[in-house]
Image (spheres, rainbow, N blue to C red):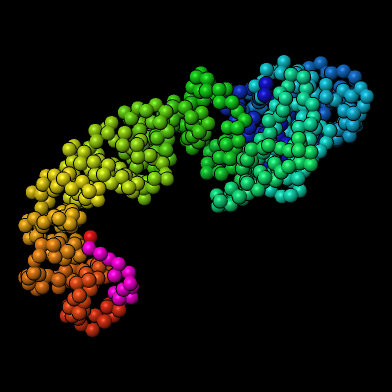
């Protein structure tokens, strides 16, 4: 039986709510749990765990104070510890159990009377003090009667006799909840230093494992600010003590953010997953649970199957809750069976996008089977929604490529998204290979072919690019986008001659990019002869002016004339087309002339 105490030096940190959520979460994983309320002056665990209707009495009949009072009054232990615990109703489908040992019949006068009559100092510090043996016996009787996997103790705040038992005698682990203020941190540090010096009971571990938790942090704080707070709190807690042997060596604290909805209506986020969706605090709880719960208790095959079945059974009545239950289960267990069922649920509910892709990628990483149809569903429906593609986001390129290839390598849209991802990651050559392979299985469009040529040119794979040009020249040889890519390929090599077929298509290329057309003419050594529409530069200028937002093309074009020492001709062309409006446009085009001078021949 693992005993975990939850302690805070001051109140208002959400400690009791954490205990209740942990108890409920463990039960969902089939565990037997005992929750004990040792916050005797302000007990409240029964309010969190026992569902109480507005017209019902919330008062437990008896609890720990009654047990201790009976021991002191009669000089011996009560006959049955089961009389002082109550089973917590959990609802259908939950294999585990939670029993609560409340503080007592709170808030009845009888409870406060019994509590006031207990002399804790006498119980723990008299010559024949029975306090510590009593609580060790309570723990042992709970173990014998219920055989629980976990005993969760909600401890008193501050420094008290009963708090000392909860933090030093009973626990194997201590969750210390903190607030980020000097009073709270100094008090908690003093308590934690003191715990190190208290002798442990026979048979217990040599030291209590302490898990610090920084509570009630504002949500949406910038990550760098949170990291600074974590570093400052860690440094404060682990600062050298007066006696160096008392110095703490605590890990960085976990975080529990503020959930404003709980301030309006308190509830267990674990017990109401459909209401917890999107709660940053629920995510924080799950990170804390990962620190507390041994994964081997969860991953036993029969128990895992029961948990999956429970989530699936709830799908009809509570689809959002069932989905969140599977998502939480996947996050905690990291098991392929859970991810597989989660993807089936996403498909059934027509959910797609980054969340689905992340689950699919994790399944792939666990089983390395790209042929799973659920993976193809996730990629097919979700990859194109990740815009813009970022290497810092899921999914990974290796995962996407493996699934794409396993499903025939013939999906044009996925291939283009995949190539875009590799190009963004500056793997231009591999991006081009994806597009070449697509051409072997499908009939790519002109834009895709042109892009493939450009990727090969940027990778200096000129021979491969020329093969692609020759393969599609008959199909796209009169189309501007294909011709532009071909022109860029020629211009990327200083020794390449302009093919006659390309040189005859300057006007088509100019419609895509005037500067490419002009530089290609220059490379061909052609004198820019008049055409049906007049001087070719004038025609190109007219094309640039036809754009809805012509400024960029016009700037590029004026830069080319400027580099050729012919800017006066450009301005004359502009006046012939625009008349008096030319001066205004020319002022816009020259407003960043220093930038334009940096443009070089591509």
In this view, 569 is above or below 464: below
Q: Is residue 530 visible in this depiction of the protein?
A: yes
In this view, 260 is above or below 546: above
| 157 left or right of 286 in image | right
Q: Position of residue 529 (x, y in %)?
A: 7, 70
In this view, 52 is above or below 514: above
Q: Residue furthest bottom?
A: 580
Q: Could you tell me which quadrant the C terminus lies in?
A: bottom left
Q: Position of residue 99 (x, y in %)?
A: 69, 25
**Residue at 83%, 22% in the rendered image:** 134
Image label count? 0
Q: Position of residue 463 (x, y in %)?
A: 16, 45
Q: Quadrant of residue 364?
A: top left
Magenta highlight on residue 599: yes
Q: Nearer the viewer, residue 52 or 387?
A: 387
Q: Residue furthest front?
A: 495
Q: Nearer the viewer, residue 54 or 424?
A: 424
| 453 left or right of 24 in image | left
**Residue at 25%, 41% in the rendered image:** 434
Q: Position of residue 143 (x, y in %)?
A: 71, 18
Magenta highlight on residue 411: no
- Residues in magenta? 588-601
**Residue at 15%, 55% in the rendered image:** 495
Q: Could you tell me which quadrant the N terminus lies in?
A: top right
Q: Is residue 9 visible in this depiction of the protein?
A: no
| 116 left or right of 381 in image | right
Q: Nearer the viewer, residue 101 or 177?
A: 177
Q: Residue furthest right?
A: 127
**Residue at 11%, 56% in the rendered image:** 497
| 313 left or right of 288 in image | left
């Amino acid at each position: 039986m693992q005993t975990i105490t939850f302690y805070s030096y001051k109140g208002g940190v959400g400690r009791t709510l954490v205990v209740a959520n942990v108890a409920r979460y463990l039960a969902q994983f089939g565990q037997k749990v005992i929750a004990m309320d040792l916050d005797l002056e302000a007990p409240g665990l029964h309010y969190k765990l026992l569902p109480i209707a507005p017209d019902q009495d919330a008062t437990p009949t008896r609890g720990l104070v009654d047990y201790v009072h009976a021991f002191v009054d009669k000089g011996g232990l009560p006959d049955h510890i089961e009389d002082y615990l109550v089973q917590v109703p959990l609802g259908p489908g939950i294999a585990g159990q939670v029993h609560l040992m409340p503080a007592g019949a709170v808030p009845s006068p009888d409870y406060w009377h019994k509590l006031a009559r207990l002399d804790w100092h006498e119980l723990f510090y008299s010559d024949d003090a029975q306090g510590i043996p009593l609580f060790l016996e309570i723990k042992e009787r709970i173990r014998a009667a219920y055989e629980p996997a976990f005993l969760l103790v909600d401890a008193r705040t501050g420094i008290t006799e009963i708090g000392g038992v909860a933090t030093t005698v009973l626990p194997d682990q201590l969750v210390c909840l903190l607030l980020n203020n000097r009073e709270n941190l100094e008090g908690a540090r003093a308590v934690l230093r003191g715990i190190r010096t208290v002798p442990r009971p026979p048979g217990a571990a040599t030291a209590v494992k302490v898990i610090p938790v920084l509570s009630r942090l504002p949500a949406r704080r910038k990550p760098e600010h949170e990291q600074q707070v974590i570093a400052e709190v860690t440094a404060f807690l682990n600062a050298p003590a007066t006696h160096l042997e008392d110095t703490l060596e605590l890990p960085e604290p976990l975080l529990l953010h503020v959930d404003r909805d709980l301030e309006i209506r308190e509830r267990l986020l674990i017990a109401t997953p459909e209401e917890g969706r999107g709660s940053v605090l629920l995510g924080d709880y799950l990170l804390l649970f990962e620190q507390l719960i041994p994964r081997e208790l969860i991953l036993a095959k029969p128990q895992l199957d029961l948990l999956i079945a429970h989530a699936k059974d709830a799908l009809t009545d509570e689809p959002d809750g069932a989905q969140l239950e599977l998502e939480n289960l996947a996050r905690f267990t990291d098991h392929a069976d859970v991810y597989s069922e989660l993807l089936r649920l996403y498909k059934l509910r027509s959910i797609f996008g980054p969340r689905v892709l992340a689950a699919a990628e994790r399944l792939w990483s666990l089983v390395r089977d790209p042929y799973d149809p659920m993976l193809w569903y996730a990629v097919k429906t979700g990859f194109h929604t990740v815009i813009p593609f970022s290497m810092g986001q899921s999914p990974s390129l290796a995962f996407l490529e493996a699934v794409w290839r396993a499903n025939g390598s013939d999906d044009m849209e996925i291939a283009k998204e995949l190539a875009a991802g590799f190009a963004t990651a500056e793997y231009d050559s591999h991006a081009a290979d994806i597009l070449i392979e697509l051409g072997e299985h499908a009939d790519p469009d002109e834009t895709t072919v042109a892009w493939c040529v450009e990727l090969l040119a940027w990778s200096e794979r000129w021979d491969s690019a020329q093969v692609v040009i020759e393969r599609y020249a008959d199909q796209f040889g009169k189309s501007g986008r294909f011709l532009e890519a071909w022109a860029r390929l020629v211009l990327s090599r200083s020794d390449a001659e302009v093919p006659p077929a390309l040189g005859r298509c300057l006007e088509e290329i100019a419609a895509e990019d005037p500067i490419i057309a002009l530089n290609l003419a220059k490379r061909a050594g052609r004198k820019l002869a008049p055409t049906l529409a007049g001087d070719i530069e004038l025609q190109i200028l007219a094309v640039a002016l036809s754009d809805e937002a012509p400024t960029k093309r016009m700037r590029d074009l004026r830069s080319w004339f400027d580099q050729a020492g012919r800017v006066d001709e450009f301005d004359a062309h502009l006046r012939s087309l625009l008349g008096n409006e030319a001066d205004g446009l020319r002022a816009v085009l020259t407003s960043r002339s220093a930038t334009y001078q940096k443009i070089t021949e591509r």
